[in-house]
Image (cartoon, rainbow, N blue to C red):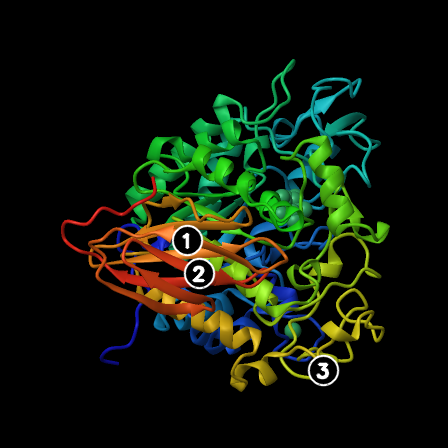
Amino acid sequence: MPGAPTASRAPGWFRTAVFYEIPVRSFYDSNGDGVGDLPGVTAKLDHLADLGVGAIWLLPFYRSPWKDEGYDISDHFSVDPSLGTLDDLDRLVAEAHARGIRVLGDLVTNHVSIDHPWFQEARRDRGSRFRSWFLWSDTGKEFSRTRVIFRDFEVKNWSWDETAGQYYFHRFYASQPDLNYDSPEVRAEMLRVARFWLARGLDGFRCDAVPYLYKREGTRCQSLPEVHRFFHELRAMMDEEHPGTVLVAEANQSIPETVPYFGEGSEFQMVMHFPLMPNLFLALGENDPRRIRHVLRATLPTPRGSGWAYFLRNHDEVTLEQVSDDEREMFLWLYGRDPRTVIHGGIRRRLAPMLEGDDETVAMMIAFSLSLPGAMFLYYGDEIGMGDRLDLPDRDGVRTPMQWTAGTNGGFSEATPERLVRPLVLDPRYAPAARNVEDQRTRPGSLLSQVRRLVQVYSAHPSEFGPDGIHFVEPGSSTVFAFWRVGTARRILCLYNFGRERSEGTVPLDAGLTLGPDLLAGSATLSRRPDGLDYGLGGRRFVWLGFSASPTGRVGGD
Ligand code: BGC
Ligand code: MG
């Protein structure tokens, strides 16, 4: 097909692509067995292409007893039968690539399912070669400084195993024993797993629970130098054997502990920006964006060839581990007053309900994430403002079936397990009848239309919204956050009002900027003076404005 897009792996492709996260079981059920599947994702690729998505991240689709949404793998080399076959994956990859969409898998290195044959053999026989693939103890007292992550469900990181006659270590659920990375066999096996999926055409991986692979007595058992060495080795293999593929780190840590995952350009190309995420919501709640500037100043620029992965929501709870106790209290007061939302110290809520169901605020937050240097990861369903289901256990309430149509099952059948669809929909404002793709696709002004338009504008300005460079501006308003993105021919002024009330101010303009403003997205009242731009911005509203750069002009700001 002449002119058809292809999924190029040109250097740095990932720093301007829009990523889209898909829990396969929740996306689209192609065969009516009640479970979303890989052919279902293939069937819906046109929705993603239409949205302008450049890459999808598939949550684990490997064989699993599904005690933790597939993050408990029992065979790393097959597709779970409920989701399809290897052929289905091949078809999905080919169809995605034909639409210019890359496909990332999820590489779960830290642990396996308790059902995995490796663990089954290891627990049965102290002499098994797999015994040393896991961490055992007679006392369960080692590594006592290790944080318990699923703290609402687990009290310890060691569980007694009757068959093994020893305790085994698990960072997450007891049904997910941790692998022992001091075993060279384990390390080699994980590289083999990565190679297997790369050879099938995957364009890279989001890497799960990155900081936790190694345990050392007396430490908190996270982000140890050995962890960096392992991922450095994985990256080197990928660069060598599959150039242009990408590694994205899930490392939910403080700024000083998160930044090193870029490894000065030789480790992860992308790192999820966990330190920024809660601050965006706090800034909105406090009508004050100053905290955002602090985080961005401390985390930009990223090393050459790398970029942050910004996200607003994902398939987990909003984690609040990277904020202070006071901030957490404030966050819970703002967004988690219903005690059912609180889990593991964070909150299990979708984007739209956190933002009071206001499409314009959702659009502003998506615009904000798109406009920073780096790339954005959009969580499925947030483009139509899906809601959460607090009656479902654990994090299932933010993993409900994608709402394709007004029908309550959104493409899922009667056979859908209760965890995926229940007749009771708690809040009619977010029900499929109120929010679905079919309706929003063609309705101008719908959230989906707005997000599609934002992605279009973003993609049409790869030089301005490029991987580097952001110039903060003093906007003359305490609730407005402002910056320039500077391209070769144009500059884009981005203004975001984090306050609830309308705000006015003036942005200094360099005299050389002769042309503009051009309204690219959002809305504001504007009046141009020779040396500045007077603006009025509604509460929780934003605007992107294009200006022509003069060859000699100075940008203004810093
Ligand atoms: C994933 C979670 C998962 C955990 C254990 C993560 O951080 O995002 O969904 O439960 O790792 O694999
Ligand atoms: Mg199915």
SS assignment at label 3: loop
In the current view of this chain or complex, which residue is farthest to the top? Answer: 218
Q: Real-space Cα distance between discs 3 and 1?
A: 43 Å
Image-quadrant location for residue 108: top right
First along the sequence among labels 2 and 3: 3
Most foreground residue, 44 or 72: 44
Label 2 near label 1: C-beta < 8 Å? yes
Residue 374, percent from left and from top: 40, 49
Q: Residue drawn at (74%, 58%), measured in percent from left and top?
A: 396
Judged from the image, the secondary structure of the residue bearing numbered disc 2 is strand
Q: Nearer the viewer, mark 2 or mark 3?
A: 2
Q: Which mark is residue 213?
A: none
Q: CA distance from mark 1 to mark 2?
A: 6 Å
Question: Tags 2 and 3 in contact by the CB under 8 Å rule?
Answer: no
Say which residue label 3 marks.
433
Label 3 environment density (alpha carbons within 10 Å; few <14, some 14–19, many ≥20): some
- Look at the image and tell me in which quarter the N terminus lies: bottom left
Q: Is residue 232 above or below residue 40?
A: above
Q: Residues within 10 Å of mark 1 (few under 14, many from 20)?
A: some
Residue position marked by numbered label 2 in the rendering: 535
Report the residue at 83% width, 69% height from top: 426
Kindly identify the amino acid type of the residue bearing the numbered disc 2: Tyr
Q: Earlier in the sequence, mark 3 or mark 1?
A: 3
Tell me the amino acid under the disc marked 1: Thr
Numbered marks: total:
3
Distance CA(mark 2)–CA(mark 3): 38 Å
